[in-house]
Amino acid sequence: MKNPRVRFAPSPTGYLHIGGARTALFNWLFAKQNKGQFLLRIEDTDLERSKTEYIDQITDALSWLGLNWDEDIVLQSKNKSRHQEMVAKMLDNGTAYRCFLQKEELDNLRLASEQKKEVFRVPQTYRDLSENKVQELLNQGKSFTVRLKVPKGETEFTDLVYGTIKVQNKDLDDFIIARSDGSPTYNFVVAVDDSDMNISHVVRGDDHLANTPKQILVYRALGLNEPIFAHLPMILGSDKKRLSKRHAATNVQEYKDKGFTATVILNYLSLLGWNPDSDKEIFSNNELIESFQFDQVQKKSAVFDEKKLLWISQQHLTEMSVRDAMNEIYKLNPDWGDGLDWNYLKEIVKLIKDRSKTISEIAEMSELFFQEKLEYDQELISKTFTQESVSITEDFKNALEACQEWNRKEIETIFDNLMSQHDVQIGKVMKPIRIALTGIPYGPGIFDLILLLGKEMCLKRLRKLLSLFD
RNA sequence: GGCCCGUUCGUCUAGUGGUUAGGACUCAUGGUUUUCAUCCAUGCAACAGGGGUUCGAUCCCCCUACGGGCUGCCA
């Protein structure tokens, strides 16, 4: 398993799906762990649905995740002539044949056997036609598809995740490798491309498990080396159906916007369908690379759970340095804290990072320190401020105004005085002041908060709040 | 319909022919904390069903059910 070559092969018919990201991740982990190559191939042969803007979206998302690919991106559409050549080769060596059954004939036959409750099989009418007969039909201008001559017997392969898979070839039908317009089909193209790219391990979603025997028959018909296969279980939504927008965001970009770091996403995704064989759950990218094993990949599909994602994110934040957290905030919002002193921003982040679950939560909470004036929530204000708490707040403002030194001890003394003056516990003092200063009933320690906001800002806000009760 | 794959707490997952079936997330309760969050403690909660094999099956075999995939001149 030295220097494997793997690939991620999305079709550009949409953004990078969270399931696709997981597939890419496992490919990447395997490549990195074994000093191999991780390649990217864009399967853009569906002209109807493929869009170049999706290619950009997908590559942007992969880059953001840090799943960098080696070598140039392969565009499947560029391999057309190669595909034609391989179809011709199969026609030539007798592993494929021209089938002159027309689409309508096929549809009717399919319908008929459905009504008779029979298993539909593509008739092999043209499978062993003589050269002359074929030529005759060609001369008549009859259109044809190219079908693979599925041999008798069975096809077996060993999947790194699912073990031995065996199917009877008779269940496969002589499937089409080239359409009547000459374009080759997926199961054919994928085998040719993977072979041309020297892919050693095909790692992909298990929705391809049933296609694999067909692809193996293509390899054999062409005399190509078969890769090793590893299929990954699907990611489902909370109702156990394929993960879709109804359940949660499916676009990787959306998770970025929600303030999850790439590392967090990769960490969570890795745990979906893989177990690290230990109690460890929080992983850096490098730790994932070291730990990943196919034999610990689950066979059953996994349900995506945003609650656990949030927990993973929070765990990462507590381990993250203030500096790294700031970089992540800037990545998310380049304008963050514009014009403010770097050291001041650093103190802010230090104060709120460990009580946040996502990067965007930090950014949001940090706004407290930026704005001159606050918007107070009317309901919260009327719930919080009684006559007593207004008077406490008033006294606090006065004490602040009189305060000469700006340090923690001074503030603590002010609080002590307020407590004995009004004969109340600290909660009665802290709560109204916190809300006056921040507009929200939770957050960093009150003394840290006051010190960092600074005397001027505190006084401004206290005056503003008190003006509501004049 | 045919073929392939799967099924352990709500979720992610350990696990073994004999276990009090373990951990994590969530949730609930209590504690710590100047609020919130963290943290700590406790609790709730699972072997899909039926047949075998066996002294004994969650574990091995078969069937059923359920879920997913493929079955296309989509990828």
Image (cartoon, rainbow, N blue to C red):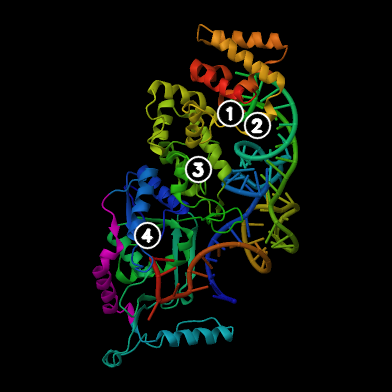
**In the image: residue A462, left or right of residue A122:** right
Q: Which residue lies at the image location 44% right of the left edge and 39% below the top edge?
A: A263
First reached walking from the N terminus: tag 3 or tag 4: 4
Residue A355 located within the stretch drawn in magenta: no
First reached walking from the N terminus: tag 1 or tag 4: 4
Q: Position of residue A463 (x, y in %)?
A: 57, 20
Q: Are marks 2 and 1 in contact (CB under 8 Å)?
A: yes
Q: CA distance from mark 1 to mark 4?
A: 46 Å
Q: Which residue is mark 2?
A: A380
Q: CA distance from mark 2 to mark 1?
A: 8 Å
Q: Are marks 3 and 4 on the same chain?
A: yes
The residue closer to the viewer here, A128 or A402, is A402
Chain of the residue under the numbered disc 4 shown in the image: A
Q: Are marks 1 and 4 on the same chain?
A: yes
The residue closer to the viewer here, A250 or A7, is A250
First reached walking from the N terminus: tag 1 or tag 3: 3
The residue closer to the viewer here, B67 or A450, is A450
Q: Which mark is residue A268?
A: 3
Q: Which span of residues is magenta-colored?
A: A71-97
Q: Is residue A228 above or below residue A345?
A: below
Mark 4 against mark 2, which lies toward the viewer?
2
Q: CA distance from mark 2 to mark 3?
A: 36 Å
Q: Which mark is residue A12?
A: 4
